[in-house]
Image: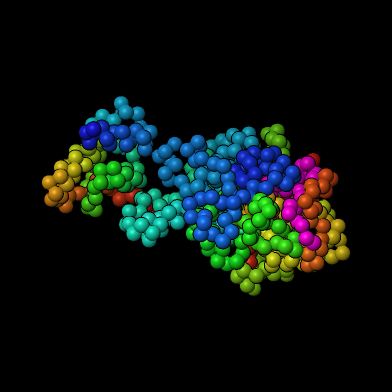
Amino acid sequence: MRRVAVTGIGVVSPLGHCPEDVFEAARAGRSGVHRLDIAGAQRLTAPLAATVRFDGAEHFEPPQLRLLDRVSQFAVVAARRAFAHAQCELTDVERERTGVFLGTGMGGTLSMDDGYQTLYGQQSNRIKPMLILQGMHNAPAAWIAIEHQLRGPTLTYSTACSSSSVAIGEAWLRLACGALDVAVAGGAEAPLSIGSLKAWEAMHTLASVDGANPATSCKPFSKNRSGMVLGEGAALLVMEPWDRAVARGAVIHGEILGYGLTTDAAHITRPSELGQAAAIHSALASAGLCPQEVDSINAHGTGTLANDSVETSAIKLVFGTRANQIPISATKAVHGHLLGAAGALECVLSLLALQHNVALPTLHLQEPDPQCDLDYCANEARPGGAGQTLLSHSFAFGGTNAVLALRAAR
Amino acid sequence: MTTVDRIRAMLVKDFKIAPEQLTLDARLEDLGIDSLGMADMVFNIEDAFGLNVPDTAVTLTTFGEIVQFIDDLVVAGDRAQAPRTVLPLSPVQAP
């Protein structure tokens, strides 16, 4: 198996548009969550979201823009940024061996919502001719491939909240075994329509508004947590074999050591500590690590009652008495839950945490919960806390658990 | 504004085509308007002209043919007895 380096990072996120800005916001605990003021927000019980400042017209000419749902716009811009960051010029032959691996949970749901509004809301039959192309889940990956002329596999993964960790993991597998030479991998999500927010709300998974400060509404691992806050954005990595990166003098931002993937096969929503623990074990095995070698963890940490206590139990199952000595970060408190892009954005934050050797804080952890009794780096970043080796967890409705094992390039 | 001016302005705005390229004999293919672009253009023309382009097939290949076709529909509409003519659409090429 070949070692795999991350040489480019591109982000479009509620915390900023370049990796360092995103990292600094997460380190300082500047929340991207706010009250949502889009049309129809008054129909939401808790109008909250982590939105991205983004105008597609600044990035695309009108003929292409009309074909692109917001999720594809995010993905294509993040890919541009990742390739620019990687300073990676591909030859024609290399493009044949370059793949796109993209996670998205809801694809072009904004466009579909708009189409349904036309059809059912306005009782009009005038559906825009590009709706299918905007709405299809594989559009973001396809547009990246078209723009950069990447002719290897172009794959879209939709495993709800673990989609983009799966995408990065699957890219890692192909690079590690020699099937590909370059991959752009990560996720994109643009789920903030009233339709999808109402659907998430109906499941009783969303956080209620913190009256004192809406930006603090998502409170992972805190006893007073009330749910997650939806976010939007994209994060993409350029990944390549370590030797190739070294040979071309690339800046290496970190290493993907391995990847664990398991399925609960139990319940469509309720997380399973056994399934999650199995994914952690699987990631350790694939990376050739023993539990003692894990220095820190990026938790899935959604801020829902069920996730945070079950994830705590899973960590204890794997790490035993050492579990409370491992710094754990839950950054969704500040960037929201980007669903199919969450794992990729957290992978970016984790790589930067390793680079800076800083364990990122879990914000808004105001009340300790006896069921969540590990070290979550509450409210303050911890210099020296990330260490050399980090696990990034992503768990999902549907029960697909993905864990990435990452190492600093220092 | 005449039909030709209105459609020309739409193509300049929506497709970023230089106005001087939009001569009546300019081929749509050469202007970068493929079957997908045609579907998009017809939708926008329907909105702008308040037309309902009938859903039957015909092949139009130049800018001038489109203008003539839409002009005919407008005139027919003005006479309030639009004949069921033709759609300037080749089907979107799909796998």
Q: Position of residue A290 (x, y in %)?
A: 82, 58
Q: Is residue A394 left or right of residue A147?
A: right
Q: Tell whether position A353 is magenta.
A: yes
Q: Quick one: A341 or B13, which is closer to the camera? A: B13
Vertical relation: A364 (above or below) A14: below
Residue at x 16% of width, y 52% of height: B84
Q: Is residue A96 left or right of residue A359?
A: left
Q: Is residue A11 left or right of residue B10?
A: right
Q: Is residue A340 left or right of residue B93?
A: right
Total labels: the figure holds 0
Quarter of the image that includes the C terminus of chain B: bottom left
Quarter of the image that includes the N terminus of chain B: top left
Q: How is the image coloured?
A: rainbow
Q: Residue furthest bottom?
A: A266
Q: Quick one: A18 or A133, which is closer to the camera? A: A18
Q: Position of residue B54 (x, y in %)?
A: 22, 51
Quarter of the view holding residue A84: top right
Quarter of the view holding residue A8: top right
On the question of residue A249 being in view, the answer is yes
Residue at x 70% of width, y 33% of height: A249
Q: Tell whether position A327 is magenta.
A: no
Q: Quick one: A22 or A95, which is closer to the camera? A: A22
Residue at x 83% of width, y 44% of height: A383
Residue at x 69% of width, y 39% of height: A20
Vertical relation: A302 (above or below) B90: below
Looking at the rendering, the stretch of residues picked out in magenta corresponds to A346-368
Q: Position of residue A58 (x, y in %)?
A: 50, 36
Q: Position of residue A342 (x, y in %)?
A: 63, 53
On the question of residue A177 being in view, the answer is no
Vertical relation: A182 (above or below) A341: above
